[in-house]
Amino acid sequence: MTGNALLSVEDVSVELPTPRGNLRAVDHVDLTVGAGQTLGIVGESGCGKTMLSRAILQLLPKKAKLTGRVMFDGQNLLQLSPEKLRKLRGRSLAVVFQDPMTSLNPVLTIGTQLIETLKEHLELDEATAVKRSIELLAAVGIPAPEQRLAQYPHQLSGGMRQRVAIAIALSCEPKLLIADEPTTALDVTIQAQILDLLAREQRRRHMAMIIITHDLGVVAGRTDEVAVMYAGRVVERAPTPALFKKMRMPYTEALLAALPRLDAAPHTPLPAISGRPPDPTRPLKGCSFSPRCRYAVARCHTEKPALAQADSLEHQFACFHPIEVHAGAGA
Amino acid sequence: MAFFVARRLLYLIPVLIAVSLLTFSIASLLPGDLAYTILGDQATPENVAALRADMGLDQPIWWRYLSWLGNVLQGDFGRSFRTGQTVLQAVVERLPVSLELMLLAQLGALSIGVPLAIVCAARSGGPFDRFMTGSAFAMLSVPTFLSAILLIYFFAVELRWLPATGYVPFAEDPAANLRFMVLPALTLALAEWPGIMRVLRSDMIATLQEDYIALAKAKGLTPARILFVHALKPSSLTLVTITGINIGRLIGGAVIVEVIFALPGIGRLLIGAIGTRDLIILQGVVLLVGAGFVIMNFIVDLLYAVLDPRIRHGHA
């Protein structure tokens, strides 16, 4: 939308061949992230948010079919040569994966895994790279960073490992960091620390960030814009304050209602979203959320609503019967 | 690490006792009386009885085992009743031949199998991978005696590049020694690279699916660094195991290859001992070879720890 967007995902679809036919994991998604901005992508498991992040990083499985354009810093990532793409990855486009137990190589030391990125992209000599690594580990809050360099991932706790993964991602001062469920695999007590660390480093480095999560609570205070995904599509998209003030898509409302609340009376049942997401190998004719939507009418089952702007330029949603009432404040 | 080594060394003791027990019983349970074998058809019952008493054959079997074991522990493995050579002398004489053959064969098999496995894994499912996997399977079904004869036919008879049989010690003439060793080592390597390639290929394909490989790609590392630094090491545990087993097996000599190429190695020593019913040699050599095998496996265990820090630190 904006001319100076750092990343713009334009009409991106991802199809995966399965024995039961093609699975459309991402369905015509448009998104933009400006320099220094934070975008939250929210949705339940299997809604295509991880596939979308892999599509941006060009890390899809070999058999996946990707269409559309991913413009990053003025270049279409889909048309870059493998060598140019490699120079971009880790340098200006970095990622933190969900599970720090599996995303660090178990047979290489923390030092090796940090230093190799620095040496690859910044052409530092060994001594400078070691010094930078120690600074990076200290910056992400790891005590005794010098000793950590010689340690292996299994000698660190999950939270510490995720900090190492963040240090690796930050090492070359990327322009965009994609954090794919960075706290899902961690203890609740560590989650806020990691999110705060990401927010702090983002401000300090004036870096753009995409946070992918299933938890609306995670994006509430930490993002500029939120895109809600369902069954491979973006179904609602708005600046974060506008979204939490006035959600229009029934799915977003249901997601928020499913969050446990501290002020709820004990033993209050959680209003889970009944039913399951549609089978992605058999796309529905109408709105994909209609089978589970309590507002659905006949038209919702036969016609697919487009993602359209209604009240303001920024707030878009794909629904024939948007919620009119003010949703409960979640932030 | 020291604790790890000490613990593994302790495990060796019961294994070696079991090896010695098995070796001894195999030799003792063979039909026929050793005294008759030594003395031949003309022996009188008195002579046989005297020899039996002399060799301790009239003692109960557990007593014979313990006294044999006692001698072995003092370094006395016995002596051939035919040549008068001690077991140790015979083994020391033959071992360099078998070790050199084993070493060259492993080097050959690894230098064929490992690069092919890496290339196949990197392009798994592609035409080259399918062709190589098929070829490896075909090679696996070729027996060594056949490939040995084919190699002799092409390289010794037709092309006349290499000698067909014979042996010169390395110390005497290294170049000639290597010329004699090429074909036997190649024969063994041809039998072993398919196993190496298939095991490493499938482990490597599994490793390449790991999150940390996706992260290595996302870090913008070169494909070579991803394959050789990030993927090869965690994929090589099974490779180390089968290489260790191959080496252990070949310490005992490659019987068929040594016979075909007329190499004076351990394998031919064993065959000879079986042919002449030289039980003392047989028993001693089998024990030494068994011990070599067990120690080789111990080294493999140590290599696991070198390859995977989680094993070193007792996490796995």
Image (cartoon, coloured by chain):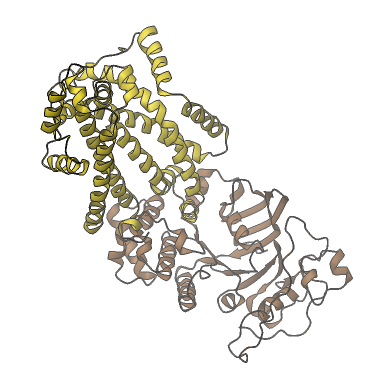
Q: Is residue B286 above or below residue B36?
A: below
x, y percentage for residue B71? 12, 40
Q: Is residue A72 visible?
A: no
Nearest to the observer: residue A64 or residue A130: A64
x, y percentage for residue A133? 34, 61
The C terminus of chain A: image quadrant = bottom right
Residue in view at x 37 percent, y 62 percent: A154
Chain displayed in yellow:
B
Nearest to the observer: residue A125 or residue A5: A125
Left or right position of B133 against A282: left
- Numbered marks: total: 0
Nearest to the observer: residue A141 or residue B214: B214
Q: Is residue A51 visible?
A: yes
x, y percentage for residue A179? 53, 65
Nearest to the observer: residue A96 or residue A133: A96
Q: Is residue A237 above or below residue A285?
A: below
Q: Quadrant of residue A170?
A: bottom left
Left or right position of A289 against B300: right
The N terminus of chain A: image quadrant = bottom right
Chain displayed in brown:
A
